[in-house]
Image: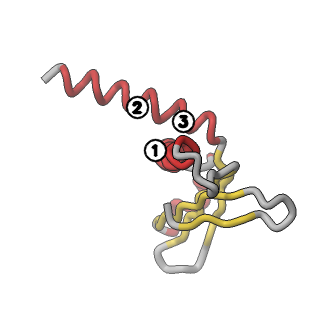
Amino acid sequence: VDALSKMPDTDEIVIWDWKTKAQNQMDSIRKYGAYAKDVAQISAYAFALQQMKSQLSPFAAKIAYLSRDSSDIAVVNVDLDHGWELFKASHHIYTLLKGAK
């Protein structure tokens, strides 16, 4: 997590993550959206803040992808419920694979 902000109209808390990517990846991000691993990661952080009953519990999440040469930015809205499901599924797979060794 790189930042928390408050929406001026609603006072809802937004959790932010900033990622750097190569310039040639920016169009793909705009077309297809955020990387699944990034969505799962920010959703897990949001869930943790919610579970701690923090006054800064996020209602929304955004990932800002910055090109490495700082010439471009793409901001993607994150569905926190979907991201949490992705995180739980990936954690389950990790646990299964770890037990198979």
Q: Which amino acid does label 3 sit on?
A: Trp
* Residue 38: percent from left, percent from top: 49, 49
Q: Label 2: few (<14), some or many (≥20) within 10 Å? A: some
Q: What residue type is labelled 2?
A: Ser
> What SS does tag 2 mark?
helix
According to the picture, the residue beneath numbered tag 1 turns out to be 37
The residue sitting at 66% across, 41% down in the picture is 79
Measured Cα–Cα span from mark 1 to mark 2: 9 Å
The residue sitting at 58% across, 79% down in the picture is 71
In this picture, residue 79 sits left or right of residue 17: right
The residue sitting at 69% across, 58% down in the picture is 13
According to the picture, the residue beneath numbered tag 2 turns out to be 90
Query: In what quadrant of the picture does the C terminus appear?
Result: top left
* Residue 27: percent from left, percent from top: 61, 59
Task: Determine whether 73 is above or below 94 in the image.
Answer: below
Disc 1 to disc 2: CB gap under 8 Å: yes
